[in-house]
Image (cartoon, grey):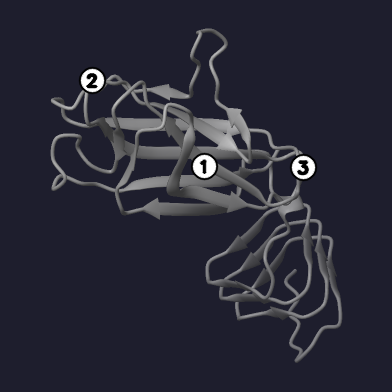
């Protein structure tokens, strides 16, 4: 037997069996569904819908608020922040120094979540040296090797006569905080100078660099 309900407003709707709606419903109060909710048109939601079974919608779903991050499963991307560096950086420092403009800040929503950091850049030397780069959270080096006398996140073997090298660092970090956290790239050289975003032997051959962070739910 099929039952039909026609109403301008239903205060609260609880359905223990399958419910099909062929027009555009607007839920301004909480609705609880323990069986399939099938909507054949648009769905407008300004309050909670609690469903323990499938919700099938063939139209557009309009939500007045964001989905709660607590309702998302592990591995969901909760937020993305990115910075692009378009100018050229040069340094002759033999100690690690900030690559200016290649940093990004993110505020995790939970201290248990992880941050996926991706840095992509082009670098070269202006002489016979090997630039090294560190991925840094705040003032702490991360993405570090367990061996080596001069450890770094990435070591590029370049010279001034060679084309620039493409550097890429991808690291899943656990900052364990809900405070704003800054990630950045630092570089150093064995001698002479190194550059970022251009070739070592030509100031006219340039590129861009990016650093992107994504909060991952756990």
Residue at 54% over, 52% down: 80
State the separation of the CA atoms marked 3 and 2.
Answer: 44 Å
Name the residue carrying label 2: 128
Image: 13 above or below 73:
below
Task: In this rendered view, identify the residue nearer to me: 131 or 26.
Answer: 131
SS state under label 3: loop
State the separation of the CA atoms marked 1 and 2.
Answer: 26 Å
Give left or right: position of 175 versus 40. right
Image: 160 above or below 80:
above
Q: In the drawing, what numbered circle is on residue 111?
A: 3
Residue at 51% over, 33% down: 135
Label 2 environment density (alpha carbons within 10 Å; few <14, some 14–19, many ≥20): some
Q: Say which label, 3 or 1, has the lower sequence index.
A: 3
Nearest to the eye among marks 3 and 2: give it: 2
The reply to whether dot 3 and dot 2 touch (C-beta < 8 Å) is no
Quarter residue 130 falls in: top left
Label 1 environment density (alpha carbons within 10 Å; few <14, some 14–19, many ≥20): many
Nearest to the eye among marks 3 and 1: give it: 1
Task: In this rendered view, identify the residue nearer to me: 78 or 179.
Answer: 179
The reply to whether dot 3 and dot 1 touch (C-beta < 8 Å) is no
SS state under label 2: loop
- Image location of residue 144, percent across then percent down: 55, 21
Label 3 environment density (alpha carbons within 10 Å; few <14, some 14–19, many ≥20): some
Give left or right: position of 29 versus 135. right
Name the residue carrying label 1: 184
Image: 5 above or below 14:
below
Q: Say which label, 3 or 2, has the lower sequence index.
A: 3
Residue at 37% over, 26% down: 189
Residue at 53% over, 50% down: 104
Give left or right: position of 199 versus 169. left
């Amino acid at each position: 037997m099929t039952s039909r309900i026609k109403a301008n407003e239903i205060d609260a709707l609880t359905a223990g069996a399958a419910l099909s709606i062929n027009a555009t419903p607007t839920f301004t109060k909480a609705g609880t569904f323990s069986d399939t909710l099938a909507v054949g048109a648009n769905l407008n939601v300004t309050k909670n819908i609690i469903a323990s079974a499938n919700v099938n919608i063939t139209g557009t779903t309009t939500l007045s608020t964001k989905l709660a991050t607590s309702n998302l499963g592990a591995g969901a991307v909760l937020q993305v922040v990115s910075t692009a560096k378009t100018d050229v950086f040069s340094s002759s420092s033999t100690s690690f120094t900030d690559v200016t403009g290649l940093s990004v800040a993110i505020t995790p929503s939970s201290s248990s979540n992880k941050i996926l950091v991706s840095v992509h850049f082009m670098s070269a030397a202006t002489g016979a040296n090997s630039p090294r780069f560190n991925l840094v959270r705040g003032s702490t080096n991360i993405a570090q090797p367990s061996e080596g006398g001069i450890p770094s996140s990435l070591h590029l073997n370049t010279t001034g006569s060679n084309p620039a090298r493409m550097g890429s660092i991808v690291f899943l970090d656990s900052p364990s905080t809900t405070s704003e956290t800054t990630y950045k790239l630092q570089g150093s050289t064995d001698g002479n100078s190194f550059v970022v975003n251009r070739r070592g032997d030509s100031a006219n051959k340039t590129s861009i660099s990016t650093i992107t962070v994504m909060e991952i739910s756990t």
